[in-house]
Amino acid sequence: MIYSKITGTGSYTPERVLTNRDLEKIVDTDDAWIRSRTGIQQRHVRAEGQTTSDLALVACQRALAAANLTPADVDLIVVATTTPDMVFPSTACLLQDKLGVTNGTPAFDIQAVCTGFVYALSMADKFVRGGSARCALVVGAETFTNLLDWSDRNTCVLFGDGAGAVVLQPSKTPGIYSTHLHADGRHANMLSVPGAFCAGQANGSPTVKMDGGAVFKFAVKVLDQVCREALEANGLQIADVDWLVPHQANIRIIESTGQKLGIDAGRVVVTVDRHGNTSAASIPLALDLAVRDGRIQPGHKVLLAGVGGGFTWGSALISM
Ligand code: UT7
């Protein structure tokens, strides 16, 4: 039996930090409200001219270095993003060029908003298990601040920019035990950027629209469900899991999910305080930070779980 295993992680956040106090000068909000309702203290914002593939590039270089590999080894690139550099080519193709991968390696984007990384990991897992790839780069990268209306306090305080990447390689031992993906398009209007380009114009709105309360309730429900689904599929209990790395949208969603699952708060990785919600980048960013600071160790079982626009949700149970 061949599994796919994460052999390196990397991440990158732009240098520019936007604190809650900075936001107080832009929109009618305050630091105390944002902290108490979301847990967010700051977020990173891309530099002028910096694109999603630029952020992804640094995260990938760091992941490859951690795996002792070079771009020449890569034979699959999957980028999860909601904020591509352009309509086409895909961000994955642009990233391939920036990385200097010139061997015709397949490269494509996945759009599942905040669940994007879990979807991308699941796709790449299938390529590696099936023998079509031996070194897959899986990236979640976003310049999500491009989609914000800075006068809408309901949304602009929540999101930030960043990228996280992992290298997946074949292994005789797990590896990724299983992935579980779901979607329900009936909830499309709960969280969306309801715009598109047509005849040189943006039709509809180019910024995020959200029913925050409805998203909150939906997220808590499906994160719990999809984590339990992963545990049941592998005959495990939550006590068997060393770390939960959930999508980082709101500390109250993370805490509620942890409580419903019955996992100790100390075994839940939290980065929402410093990154805000970085959509597809949030899970790999959190994973990389916990690997680099030594919390997640080789052999640890880690449960990843995401939820986002679509609506989409999913989980992955992995051994590091
Ligand atoms: O990846 C998924 C992406 N999205 C999410 O995860 C969002 C999920 N939802 C949430 O995180 C929460 O619902 C929010 C953080 C968006 C809102 O928290 P809440 O506790 O549900 O607040 P609320 O919507 O009930 O709003 C309470 C009050 C309202 O004022 P009134 O109508 O009671 O006078 C809002 O206008 O808070 C007000 N408010 C703010 N006040 C200061 C909303 N945003 C802000 C703000 N600063 N930024």
Image: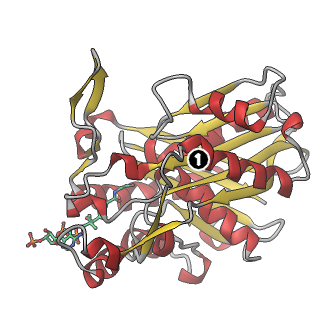
Quadrant in which ligand 1 is drawn: bottom left
73 horizontally vs 213: left or right: right
Q: Nearer the viewer, residue 215 or 159?
A: 159
Report the amino acid beneath label 1: Gly
Residue 283: quarter of image: bottom right
Point 85% across, 54% down: residue: 65
Q: Residue furthest left?
A: 28
How many residues crowd around disc 1 within 10 Å: few (fewer than 14), some, or many (20 or more)? many
Q: Secondary structure at mark 1?
A: strand
Position of residue 300 measured from the top left corner of the image (x, y, whole percent): 77, 67
- Vertical placement of 67 versus 116: above or below? below
Point 68% across, 27% down: residue: 107
Quadrant of the snapshot with the N terminus: top right
- Vertical placement of 113 versus 198: above or below? below
Position of residue 293 measured from the top left corner of the image (x, y, whole percent): 73, 76
Q: Nearer the viewer, residue 320 or 11?
A: 11
Q: Nearer the viewer, residue 240 or 315?
A: 315
210 horizontally vs 179: left or right: left
Q: Is residue 261 visible?
A: no
2 horizontally vs 272: left or right: right
Q: Nearer the viewer, residue 46 or 283?
A: 46
Position of residue 227 measured from the top left corner of the image (x, y, whole percent): 53, 58
163 horizontally vs 65: left or right: left
Residue 205: quarter of image: top left
Count of marks placed on residues = 1
Residue 318: quarter of image: bottom right
- Vertical placement of 147 versus 232: above or below? above
Point 27% across, 58% down: residue: 155
Quadrant of the snapshot with the C terminus: bottom right
- Vertical placement of 65 versus 51: above or below? below
Q: Is residue 307 visible?
A: yes
Q: Which residue is mark 1?
A: 140
